Amino acid sequence: MGTKPTGTKRAGMKRRLGRVAQGGRAGSALLASLMIVIVISGLGVVMVQLHSSVTKKQVQAIDQRRAFYVAEAGLSEAFLAVSQGKSGNVGSQAVPASFGRGLYWVEAAELDDGDVALFSTGLCGTGRFAVSAVIRRSTTPLASLGVFADSEMVIEAGVQVDGFDSDAGSFETQALGTGEDSTTGAGARLCSNGDIVLESSGIFPGGPEATAVFGDLRPGPNAAVLMGSGASVTGSTAPAESVVAVPPVSVPALESEGELVHAGSSPAVLTAREVRYDRVRVESGSALTLEGPLTLVVGALELAAGAELIVDTSTGPVCVYCTESCDLEEGSVLSASGSDPTSAALFITASDSVDADGDGDLEHPVRIRATGEFHGAIYVPSTTLSIPSGLRLFGAVAADRVVLEAGARISVDEALAQKSAGVSALPRLICWRIVALPDTPLVSLRLDPKAQLQLKGVEPTESHQAHLEDFVSIEFFDTDGELSSYEGPEAAFDWSEVGVAITTEWSADADFDEDGTAGSGPCAKPSHGGQGGGGHAKPSKPNHEGGHAKPHKLDKPHKAHKPHKPQKQHVKPHKPHAQKKPHEPKAQKKKHHRVHGPGHHHEKTVSGVVHPAWDD
């Protein structure tokens, strides 16, 4: 019979059982704590990864947006380049242009219709973006529409209008026949915001020949072509889609030098300057030559019967602004020594009737009755312009109302559609779109592009210096009205020196074509910061490295032969053109001193007054 446990033994057993139960509860709490720590740690890792992913996506989104803006900046720089007459290529894949934190390059392609396609790729951080745009080079209604009337156009019997392209050669080389009746048989462009009237014509002995328009004849949107019998149009006669806005004429602000009246058998020449006269008159039996480069502003332009006005563009463009009246009397002669219509322009802003002959009766402010030839553009925005049969015109015509008189002959120059004739305009955006990124390592590797180039030892080019054409050859009138020129790196040229640009040529190297020019047309204003197309907003000052650090003057006279101050006229005897002297550094300007034309610094008596050439 066993002995029953005593109270002491029972108490000990209870204590042992309690310790075992207490140890089991402590192990469960530890396991729960470990699980909680693991869960919290996992959540922390997930939160860190999530935050890192969100931050990375935000950075990528910011870089992508920045890359888009950089690509857009590339398009803007290329747009500016095209407006300057450059190709539009900026930077390259090998050496991109630098813009802020990013890089870009723009590739330009000439399209069949003369438009320019621009493809811009922008890179910033990990962002990549590519956009494309098609732009149309600057044109004017005067240049692109051939013969244009703002209100009405009247084509009388026997008129013949065709077209040619002076960039492809002279009219004679493109004509289908020879002689006065030769024609290209195509290329005419006649437009109006109003009706176009073709008067009846026919062929009969002693009468006018049939009217022929070898091309398009397009009236305004709500107008029509009123065609008489015996007239023919080979192109479209459909109304235009929209009304053409007639641009205003910006007349250069020059100080008048009085009147110029030339009488006598000795020829006189105006050349190589900007000049303004209240009145220019050439008397019967006299001849006046306007020799380019020349900008002439005149209040009243008058040619007496038997007088001759010669427009010589062989040495530079000629631009004439007539503000009050233009009276080329019957029996006067208008002729040309150059055959490039893109180098001559006649702007007649007159609109009010005038008493030209002093008899008390008011006459029309524009009366062109001269015979001969004119190669260029005529723009009369405020009144009627009549083209007589005796004046053969090669180029373009635009006026408020146009009358082509019986037997008139006009050949429209297609080259004027791409070359401004004094009315400046920026290129026009045709379309814009997002395009695929190019397959290049710099684009494919989503790394900082500047760091990639730095590893290769490539230094990006500043945006304004990254144009493919970084050499410029320019002839211009400076802000003092003196003729100057420059040839060398654009970075070394001070654009603030330019008053009026005459010709501008761009090149990827220092070699320029002898007679190939691009950019501004006759009498085009200089371009600064996108105003009228071209130039940087604040061009750098000359750095005196490469080319001519400062613009230089052409053919300055020797100090020992400084002529006396003239009274009125500034004319000189006509003589063969001497070859231009080699370019020299710009001489220090002298007050009241004008530039002499090449080989012209002689004195000549005209109407009893001694007139040195081009000195104030």
Image (tube, rainbow, N blue to C red):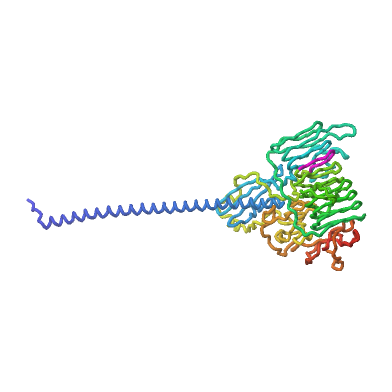
Is 542 placed left or right of 375 in the picture?
left
Q: Residue 403 colored magenta?
A: yes
- Find residue 319 and report its horizontal and vertical position in percent: 79, 52
- Rendered image quadrant of residue 101: bottom right
| Image quadrant containing the C terminus | bottom right
Q: Residue 256 colored magenta?
A: no
- Rendered image quadrant of residue 433: top right
Is 328 placed left or right of 88 in the picture?
right
Is 164 placed left or right of 534 in the picture?
right
Picture layout, residue 8 above or below residue 205? below
Picture layout, residue 172 above or below residue 454? above
- Find residue 380 and report its horizontal and vertical position in percent: 77, 47
What segment is highlighted magenta in the picture? 401-412
| Name of the residue lying farthest toward the right | 265
> Observer-nearest residue: 148 or 368?
368
- Find residue 497 and report its horizontal and vertical position in percent: 73, 61
At x 81% / y 48%, what residue is drawn?
Answer: 362
Total numbered labels placed on residues in the image: 0
Query: Is residue 576 visible in this depiction of the protein?
Result: no
At x 72% / y 39%, what residue is drawn?
Answer: 194
